[in-house]
Amino acid sequence: MDKKKVILIGASSGIGRQLARLYAQAGWIVGISGRRKEKLESLVEEFPDQIVMECFDVTGTGNIESMKNLLQQTGGMDLLVYNSGYGDISASLDWEIDRQTTAVNVNGFQEIVLFAFNYFMKQGQGQIAGISSIASIRGSSWAPAYNASKAFMSHYLEGLHIKAARLKKDIAITDIQPGYVKTDMAKGEGLFWMATVEKAAGQIFRAIGLKKRKAYITRRWWLVAQLLKSMPFYFYKKIG
């Protein structure tokens, strides 16, 4: 039986790096990407027979060519995980922060996920998982572009799920919405329910395996999601 193949976009560190390990340990062929070549190379050294790499920045112009190079190395793709993400506090509306946030979380995401969806259309089956965020649920005065970009990701993934169903294609779409995870992306004060990378990646791995439509990471963040969705605006604007 051929081994399953996954391509992980954004595997230099944090959740993406741990997911690469989990898939390799489960016997998958793993194609990884990221901007930091030395980080990718060290991961390949851990699993030289299962992990291959392509170093590229999703904000560049060569995303599709890099994806094709990864596909040649892995011999195909059964699953795409888009984990690349950027966000920072933008209290005074810093254009460079907002520009970079949109370039990674919207433009890079859309280009690569669209490519993967069309690839799976031709193949007849596949799965796409995007790491969005609990932040996708409401706007934020502290990081407007970040929350908006994560909402774009979630809505785009929902649209692809509906499109696949209407076209009667066996393409599963999974929207992963983490709360706070102990990575470089966790910024600000008052952070709570902070999960370790290992715990978060383990739950993400299982959710993708179950082909869930949406998963909150860790699972207790489902409660926060329901609260945010139901909270009246006049109250939310005091804390958002």
Image (cartoon, rainbow, N blue to C red):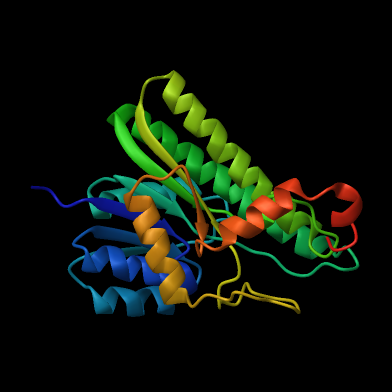
Q: Who's the residue at 35% across and 34% down the image?
A: 120
Of the pair 176 and 236, the residue shown nearer to us: 236
On screen, residue 27 above or below 81: below
- Along the line of sight, which residue is nearer the eye, 31 or 174? 174
Could you tell me residue 98's position as x and y percent?
77, 59
Of residues 87 and 96, which is closer to you in this image? Answer: 87
In which image quadrant can residue 173 be found? top left
State the count of labels: 0
**Quarter the C terminus occupies:** bottom right
Taking the spot 54% from the left edge, 42% from the top edge, the residue there is 111
Does 201 appear above or below 175?
Answer: below
Q: Is residue 117 left or right of residue 123?
A: right
Question: Residue at position x 83%, y 65% from top?
Answer: 142
Question: Does 18 sit left or right of 90 as displayed?
Answer: left
Does residue 215 appear left or right of residue 239 in this picture? left
Query: Is residue 133 at least partly visible in the picture?
Result: no
* Residue 126 visible at all: yes
Report the side of 24 relative to 203 (left or right): left
Picture coordinates of residue 39 (x, y %)?
Answer: 42, 78
Residue 121 pos. (x, y %): 36, 28
Front-most of 213 and 232? 232
